[in-house]
């Protein structure tokens, strides 16, 4: 198997392949067969030295941080149980990243519910009924489902659809649809829908804030769309510079936002304290009984109050479960309730305020400061969604569902701060098109909600599997709880399905297209691996041939990337066939992706001596980490296998894929048109040289053609 920097064959050989985490670090002294071993003190020893150990072919060696200090790409580490000042800092920071989206929902939610779409009048009964629906939507979906239960389903602290999938299949993603394929498909589709949601969320948040110009500065109302376009364009443009400085302001900005909306709501509640009775769920029941089918459609806008709920789970890896829960219970939930009740109280007093109850809560002198605060909060919400898309994409690349893309690290100390140009501009273009086409939150609200409710519905299904397989809950317990979640989600999702003809098709079509591309990439890689594996020579047979033929050996170290644990990479065979020589030291390097977010330095690198100057090196990374082959070779060099940068050459294959019709006996079937799509995606994938941080001036490429 070869490693073409620009082909899917190297995606199989060079790209990370899901694997279980490495075994605990060996306590045996590591050594290569017949070579020098680096002593625990770090001093190289001779083969005859009394402190040197001879590794036999087949013996496995581990890097152990106690013996071999390793400098590796770190990760965003979080405290599992923070307290005191640390807990306060994490809770404050989580406000901006986790709650930015749901926190800006008051800008437009009540306005859309009583907007022209449904013709619902802000009568006393309707106001109480809608507020009751809002309170219990937040309580059941966010407080109960996500905060109380779904946050428990973490994969070493990480959340999200891919983390759920890794929990259900802890030894890696299933390779066919005969084993759990439906759950793989659901997780992929849920992830694809999040990208659709990511295009609409920034547009909705910033437009919602800008519409305050109609009241704060009416003369500028006609410039709402241009100003929104400028803000969003600037936001996407500055992504390349990283979010470190801006990110530090996220928490304080969002804190001011929540205090502001809570205060505005509390002041209005003081004028109409009877509105607090809407907490009684019977008002929601009476509303449904009185309005019949209209109440079902109204749910399509009530769901706007819980958009962003999935972020609680998806962003858990950045802060941990405890700060997210504290932030929700102590500030976010009370602030949202106060503001929604305040808007309801305003509608009881002034029904005409339904045109924009949020901004009309504020006194005239506070409109411009509120507009500024709302704009900053909308930018924070947008940034959180963009950063989430970057993080999700990196997980997808590591797990083999998305082609290799350029991942730039925008911080020298924080592994989680990344920038992916292709994703950034894809979302930017989509977002700007949405703004220019829909032009206001009333029109855009018709398209908003279907993607996020679809994702929430899928999360409920996957949570049932996690409850059964990982929590070991009995069927009745898992089914009862998941059934409640599923029922609530299906109502919200069904109410949003009717939006398909009014713009809801935008995120749905985008989600389906991305789902098909991810599925095509995953199955195409599996098919290509099958083709390559079928023609792979066993390593034992190859080494016997090397010994018998007395191949000339030259000085230095050769690295061949491979995804196989046994076979010989085709690029090695091509090299030997054409160049007739082998290096003194030959490393067959595999980069694996474990089913955990991060792997420690102690368990990352394993080396097995194969004999005749050959070693197999396996580097295991978490799906939230970026692989770095030169750093792996530094560890190998510390084990005594000489891998000096200027003495090491990397041999990669450049394959040309030729799609052909499916063959009889294929274990994985892919139609020809999907093979063509796969080949196009492969040609445009980032090169293995860049993805694995391999020095380009040390790379040798050999070409071949592959029919698949």
Image (tube, rainbow, N blue to C red):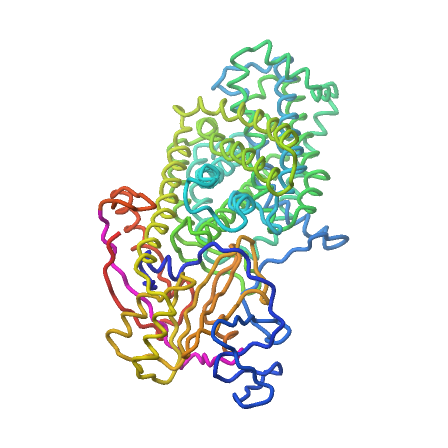
Q: Nearer the viewer, residue 599 or 87?
A: 599
- In the rendered structure, the answer to whether residue 198 lies left or right of residue 680 reads right
Image spot of residue 131 (x, y percent)? 64, 22
Q: How many marks?
A: 0
Q: Is residue 411 above or below residue 661?
A: below
Q: Quadrant of residue 306?
A: top right
Q: Nearer the viewer, residue 490 or 276?
A: 490
Q: Hey, which residue is sitting farthest top in the picture?
A: 290
Image spot of residue 7 (x, y percent)? 31, 58
Residue 347 visible (yes or no)? yes
Q: Is residue 33 above or below residue 431?
A: below
Q: Is residue 164 above or below residue 156?
A: above
Q: Quadrant of residue 11?
A: bottom left
Image spot of residue 183 (x, y percent)? 48, 38
Residue at the image point whose x is 38% and y is 37% from the top: 510
Image spot of residue 492 (x, y percent)? 53, 25
Q: Nearer the viewer, residue 242 or 487?
A: 487
- In the rendered structure, the answer to whether residue 47 lies left or right of residue 501 reads right
- In the picture, the quarter occupied by the N terminus is bottom left
Residue at the image point whose x is 37% and y is 38% from the top: 433
Q: Is residue 40 magenta?
A: no
Residue 197 visible (yes or no)? no
Q: Which residues are magenta?
A: 639-660
């Amino acid at each position: 198997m070869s490693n073409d920097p620009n082909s899917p064959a190297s995606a199989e050989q060079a790209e990370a392949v899901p694997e279980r985490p490495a075994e605990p670090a060996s306590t045996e002294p590591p050594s290569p067969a017949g070579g020098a071993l680096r002593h625990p003190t770090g001093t190289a020893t001779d083969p005859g030295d009394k402190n040197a150990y001879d590794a036999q072919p087949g013996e496995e060696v581990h890097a152990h941080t106690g013996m071999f200090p390793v400098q590796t790409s770190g990760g965003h580490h979080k405290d599992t149980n923070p307290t005191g000042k640390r807990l306060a800092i994490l809770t404050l920071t989580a406000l901006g990243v986790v709650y930015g989206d749901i926190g800006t929902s008051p800008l437009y939610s009540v306005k859309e519910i009583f907007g022209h779409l449904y013709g619902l009048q802000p009568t006393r009964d309707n106001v109480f009924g809608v507020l009751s629906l809002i309170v219990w939507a937040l309580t059941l979906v966010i407080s109960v489902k996500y905060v109380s239960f779904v946050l428990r389903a973490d994969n070493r602290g990480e959340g999200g659809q891919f983390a759920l999938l890794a929990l259900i299949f802890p030894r890696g993603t299933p390779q066919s649809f005969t084993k759990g394929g439906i759950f793989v498909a659901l997780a992929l589709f849920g992830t694809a829908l999040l990208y659709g949601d990511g295009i609409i969320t920034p547009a909705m948040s910033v437009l919602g804030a800008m519409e305050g110009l109609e009241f704060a500065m009416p003369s500028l109302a006609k410039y709402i769309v241009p100003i929104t376009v400028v803000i969003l364009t600037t936001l996407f443009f500055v992504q390349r510079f990283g979010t470190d400085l801006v990110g530090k302001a996220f928490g304080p900005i969002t804190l001011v936002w929540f205090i502001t909306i809570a205060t505005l709501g509390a002041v209005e509640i003081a004028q109409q304290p009877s509105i607090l009775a809407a907490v009684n769920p019977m008002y929601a029941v009476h509303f449904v009984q009185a309005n019949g089918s209209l109440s079902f459609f109204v749910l399509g806008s009530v769901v706007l109050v819980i958009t962003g709920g999935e972020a609680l789970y998806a962003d858990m890896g950045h802060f941990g479960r405890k700060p997210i829960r504290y932030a929700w219970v102590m500030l976010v939930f009370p602030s949202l309730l106060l503001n929604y009740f305040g808007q309801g109280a305003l509608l009881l007093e002034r029904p005409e305020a339904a045109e924009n109850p949020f901004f009309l809560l504020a006194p005239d002198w506070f409109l411009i400061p509120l507009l500024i605060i709302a704009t900053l909060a909308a930018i924070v919400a947008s940034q959180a969604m963009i950063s989430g898309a970057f993080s999700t994409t990196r997980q997808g690349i590591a797990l083999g569902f998305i082609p290799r893309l350029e991942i730039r690290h925008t911080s020298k100390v924080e592994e989680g701060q990344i920038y992916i140009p292709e994703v950034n501009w894809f979302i930017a273009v989509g977002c700007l098109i949405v703004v220019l086409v829909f032009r206001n939150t009333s029109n855009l609200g018709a398209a908003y909600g279907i993607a996020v409710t679809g994702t929430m519905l899928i999360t409920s299904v996957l949570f049932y599997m996690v409850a059964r397989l990982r929590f070991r809950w009995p069927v009745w317990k898992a089914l009862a709880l998941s059934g409640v979640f599923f029922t609530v989600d299906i109502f919200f999702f069904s109410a949003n399905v009717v939006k398909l003809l009014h713009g809801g098709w935008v995120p749905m079509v985008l989600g389906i297209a991305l789902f098909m591309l991810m599925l095509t990439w995953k199955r195409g890689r599996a098919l290509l691996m099958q083709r390559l594996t079928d023609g792979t020579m066993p390593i034992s047979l190859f080494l016997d041939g090397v010994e018998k033929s007395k191949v000339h050996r030259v000085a230095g170290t050769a690295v061949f990337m491979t995804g196989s644990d046994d076979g010989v990479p085709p690029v090695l065979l091509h090299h030997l066939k054409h160049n007739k020589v082998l290096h003194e030291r030959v490393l067959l390097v595999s980069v694996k992706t474990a089913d955990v977010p991060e792997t420690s330095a102690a368990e990352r690198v394993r080396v097995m001596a194969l004999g005749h100057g050959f070693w197999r090196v396996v580097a295991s990374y978490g799906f939230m980490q970026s692989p770095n082959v030169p750093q792996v070779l530094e560890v190998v060099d510390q084990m005594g296998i000489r891998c000096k940068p200027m003495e090491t050459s990397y041999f990669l294959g450049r394959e040309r894929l030729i799609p052909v019709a499916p063959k009889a006996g294929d274990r994985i079937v892919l139609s020809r048109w999907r093979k063509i799509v796969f080949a196009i995606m492969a040609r445009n994938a980032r090169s293995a040289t860049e993805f694995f941080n391999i020095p380009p001036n040390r790379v040798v490429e050999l070409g071949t053609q592959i029919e698949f």
